[in-house]
Amino acid sequence: MTTAQQQTTAAVVDAFFERFGAGDLPGLLDLFAERVDFRVSGSPQVPWTGARSTRQEISEFFGVFPKVLTAPQSFTLHARLVDGPHAVVMAESAFGVLATGKTFTNAYALHFSVEDGQIVRYHMYEDSYAIAEAFTAVSGERADRSRR
């Protein structure tokens, strides 16, 4: 059984990916509430990690990507799960880092919460270790992951 809230959540999440894919930053920002619990945890070497809460900060977040990354080399949306106001999306994408020429593949999960037709929570869970390696200019020995 699909509730009206689930339909709204699904529609907002679908619009998010449509607008993001089209490069429609103003349209993308319209999907966010004025105040948002917006978090991308990870390595400080990755320029988009950190917490944000306003549309201006979110605009700056999405503005970072074209400055530091190539256009996506691939994008696959594996699953979208919706439960009332919550949606979890599992996806994978590949990008090149402009400054280093290195590429990375990023498997990630996004947790959205939608209230009154707007995104009020955006939490991204990604492999920031692999991304940080792609941002590292000097290629030396790989870090021993067993010590992490």
Image: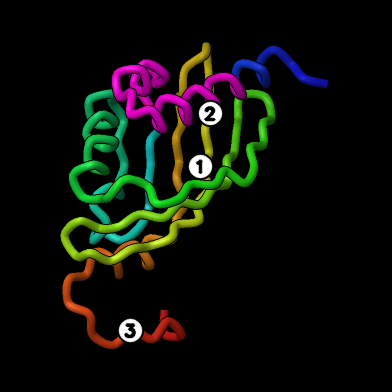
Which stretch did the figure color magenta? Answer: 9-36
Under mark 3, the amino acid is Arg
Residue 105 percent location from the top left of the image? 43, 60
| Nearer to us: label 3 or label 2 | 3
Q: Secondary structure at mark 3?
A: loop
Q: Secondary structure at mark 2?
A: strand
The CA span between labels 3 and 1 is 28 Å
Task: Give the residue number, with chain letter if any, for mark 3.
Answer: 142
Residue count near mark 2 (Cα–Cα under 10 Å), binned few <14, some 14–19, many ≥20? many
Mark found first going from the N terminus, 3 or 1: 1
| Nearer to us: label 1 or label 2 | 1
Q: Is residue 135 left or right of residue 19?
A: left
Give the residue drawn at x 45%, y 55%. Answer: 126
Task: Give the residue number, with chain letter if any, for mark 1.
Answer: 110
Magenta stretch encompasses residue 39 = no
The CA span between labels 1 and 2 is 10 Å
Q: Are marks 3 and 2 in contact (CB under 8 Å)?
A: no
Give the residue drawn at x 22%, y 80%. Answer: 139
Residue 41 percent location from the top left of the image? 38, 52
| Nearer to us: label 3 or label 1 | 3
Q: Would you identify the image quadrant in which residue 2 lies? A: top right
The CA span between labels 3 and 2 is 37 Å
Q: Are marks 1 and 2 in contact (CB under 8 Å)?
A: no
Under mark 1, the amino acid is Leu
- Please tell me which residue lies in front, 113 or 137: 137
Quadrant where the N terminus lies? top right
Residue 113 marker: 2
